[in-house]
Amino acid sequence: MANFQDKIAKLFPQATIEGDNMPMISIPDNQWHDLALALRDDEDCRMDYLVTIVGMDWKDSFGCIYYLMSSVHNTLVSVKVTTTDRERPMLHSIADVWKVGCLYEREVYDFFGIVFIGNPDMRRLFLSIDWKGFPFRKDYNEENPVSIENERQSDLTYNYVELPDGTVEKKEIEVFHPGDFVVNIGPQHPATHGVLRFRTAVDGEEIKKIDVYMGYIHRGVEKLCESLTYPQTLHFMDRLDYFSAHNYHHGLCIAIEKAAGIEISRRAQVIRVMMDELSRIASHCLFIGTYCMDLGATTMLFYTLRVREQILDIMEKTCGARMTFNYDCIGGVMQDLDPDFQKDVKALLAVLPANIKEYNKIFTGNVIAKNRMEGVGYLSREDAISYGVTGPSGRASGWACDMRKLQPYSIYSELDFDEITATEGDSMARFKVRMKEMEESAKILSQLVDNIPEGEYCVKVPKVLKLPVGRWFTLVEGCRGAFGIYIESDGSTKPYRLKIAPPCLPLAGVVDHITRGTKIADLITIGGSLDYIVPDMDR
Amino acid sequence: MQDLSTITDAIHSFLLSFLPGWLTTTVECVLIGVGLLLVYALLALFYIYYERKVCAAFQCRIGPNRVGPWGLLQSFADMFKILIKELIHLNHIDKFLFALAPYLVIIASMLAFAVLPWGNGLQIIDFNIGIFFLIAVSSIGVLGILLAGWSSNNKFTLIGALRSGAQMVSYELSVGLCIVTMVCLAGTMSVGGIVEQQSDLWFIFKGHVPALIAFVIYLIAGTAECNRGPFDLPEAESELTAGYHTEYSGIHFGFFYLAEYLNLFIVAGVASLLFLGGWMPLHIPGWDAFNNIMNYIPSVVWFVGKAIAISFIIIWFKWTFPRLRIDQMLSLEWKYLLPIHLFNLVLMVCVIIFGWHF
């Protein structure tokens, strides 16, 4: 760690480095691109995974905080780049360094209006193209930002190029070629798993290009959180990836507890981890069912829903809800476990292996299923990292990216479980990794089910919770990948900025890359195997 | 075995006793048409119920059980709903072809009904190229599907129609070759003749190995011919929403829906005709007592029962297998089924020439 800090300091004398555990490098904008290349390629850094870009408005300046992670050294680093120009804020793009950067920069542009010089696709990402202003700016007070006219459909995107004399020129680029046959798959389509829209240019059955349109269920969760107190922000976590509601709650709770210095009881930790793993099994069960349905095998859905139903019953008894649980809270969990909890979990663990065996018998070995999935949608390890594809999809490409192992939180470091990885990188591998992850989750559950310690389930926390001034970043493992929470506090009861780094946004961003040249039917296979959840990417 | 032609002959002579010859033929045609429509509607309703129940059994469910005893009236209710639904008029479509397409599809399957051997003597028309007529008329259906997809002026329907065209034209070859193989064994193209030939033993036993190969290939190709899973690419729900009939509503959609089930019955009926003896009861040479008992079961029951049993296998496919991709489906036909079947045809000819069959 110190080694690479010295190196950066030597190479970029203008950079300032603060903090030791998760250092924050501040760098002027004109050197940022070089630093980015150095951070990615240098042997001591190898920061090849761009976790997220946090757009910021500090009132006197705009800026971005880039969170970078190394897949080799497992180190986290953040880089802060700012601009004081409030009229035409511009920063240099790093879309060519990390491929997922293109998407993240579009998000920052959408919310803060920061233009990224060199980004090949500088459009809005979530908001409609005729939205007035940039809503995340602190001085934003547009009364009626939504146009009452029909939304225009534009096939144009923009690229800002820096000329040698330092001026910036705006160039128009056509998204599709004039003669392309463009099919709209979505926003209402059975296989997009939500309101996601793929504008697909096809040549016969072959896909030439996909332009992903998002934001149909964008609710501005991050903006809403800025006007809510910390305990209130928790409720939104259920409504992002609704299948990993527990995991996301857990993530935000850890972030707030870390910031406020709250220690929670071991009983609460065990309960949280058990709930996380139960949701993981339920989520993967639903994945297998809907994925098979996407491929045309409708019957599998009913087989997998049986297990999911059992888990939802367990959740219902303890949390009182089957979908938006709102169970984890700051300081522990909302209420104590149901008396039947241990018995029910044991009953689940007893039937799970037989069910998994049955799924494999019905579907995995089927020759049609093999033909549809094997070799389809290949994603290499390098691309998976560069596109930020985490979770089971990233692990299927051979990237060990399980945050439970890389950044152990709660009691995961004490538990005995394996991180499932595969090397094939195709849809079949993504399917199988999830299948095996269910077994690993069951292993965790069986270690904990008889060892739930006595104690209080929720520690006392102040009624009015204020976080000290500062910034915190936490990563947890959701059911679909790494889920990051960034909190910046100005010392009040409400977050100054709460950024959610969802795993599903990069998953949707990689679709274009891996579907090029495949068939329309493969788009369904690939989209299904990535298993994105639209409310999670749109927020 | 009761010969049902005595009844039809009696009706014929009764009509002839007070009507001139041309009017008799006209009246008989109308009667047959009405009867056919009735059978058609009832069969479709039965099939909808049947498929839903079978599907439910595969999926650990109960299936329709609310409307009427055991949910028997469910498909009547569904059909009534489709009948009273609005036909939504679309702009920017080829209105004539759009309206014509469902009728083409349904006419194709209705014409095929004309030559099915419903029972002993109960066949609408029996002429020397009956099976040839069946292949010819069932090919009209693909025209309706292509028209439906093209005239809807929608990208999904167009892709669905093109898939369907490629699929049905390809698999018609295999179906045709299966029929040719069995016609070789029968030595006649007349449907009645083919059934008569199986009076001692069904073809699937008589032709043993080549007949068995033909039967398996026929089942695969037949499933593809009626656009059912795992070959339901033209209407692949998760890819093309509903494929070629996305834009249809009301009874026009109902026609496609009915035709799909009726095509299932026709494919199963032809399979029972070619391999399981049509209406012919199970006869085993030398077992006279057994054969006589079998003869007590009415011929109509034999035919419909066989068709439903084969339909069960096809429904089973649909609710078990995932869908194929278009290139895999075409390579299955052109690289595997067709060469295997060309070889099978030669094998069958050898079997016949050298008298290796039973």
Image (cartoon, coloured by chain):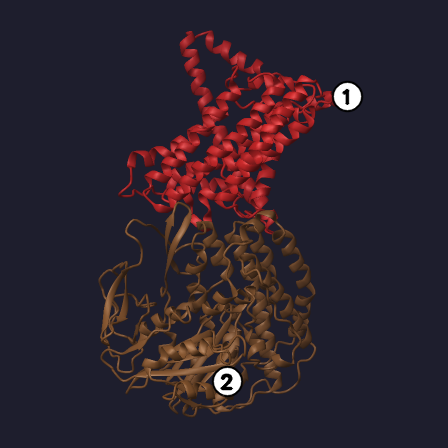
Amino acid at the residue labelled 1 = Trp
Q: Which chain is red?
A: B
Q: Which residue is mark 2?
A: A330
Count neighbours of disc 1 (C-alpha within 10 A) and say few if under 14, some if 14 to 19, many if 20 or more: few
Quadrant of the drawing holding the C terminus of chain A: bottom left
Q: Which chain is brown?
A: A
Tag 1 secondary structure: loop
Amino acid at the residue labelled 2 = Ile
Q: Chain of mark 2?
A: A
Pinpoint residue B189: horizontal percent, then vertical percent.
55, 18
Seen at 35% across and 81% down, the residue is A31
Kindly report the distance in space between the C-alpha atoms of the residues bearing marks 2 and 1: 83 Å
Seen at 29% across and 43% down, the residue is B90
Q: Is residue A238 in sight in this rendering? A: yes
Q: Which residue is mark 1?
A: B287
Q: Chain of mark 1?
A: B
Seen at 49% across and 34% down, the residue is B170
Question: Which quarter of the picture shows residue A62?
Answer: bottom left
Tag 2 secondary structure: loop
Question: Which quarter of the picture shows residue A436?
Answer: bottom right
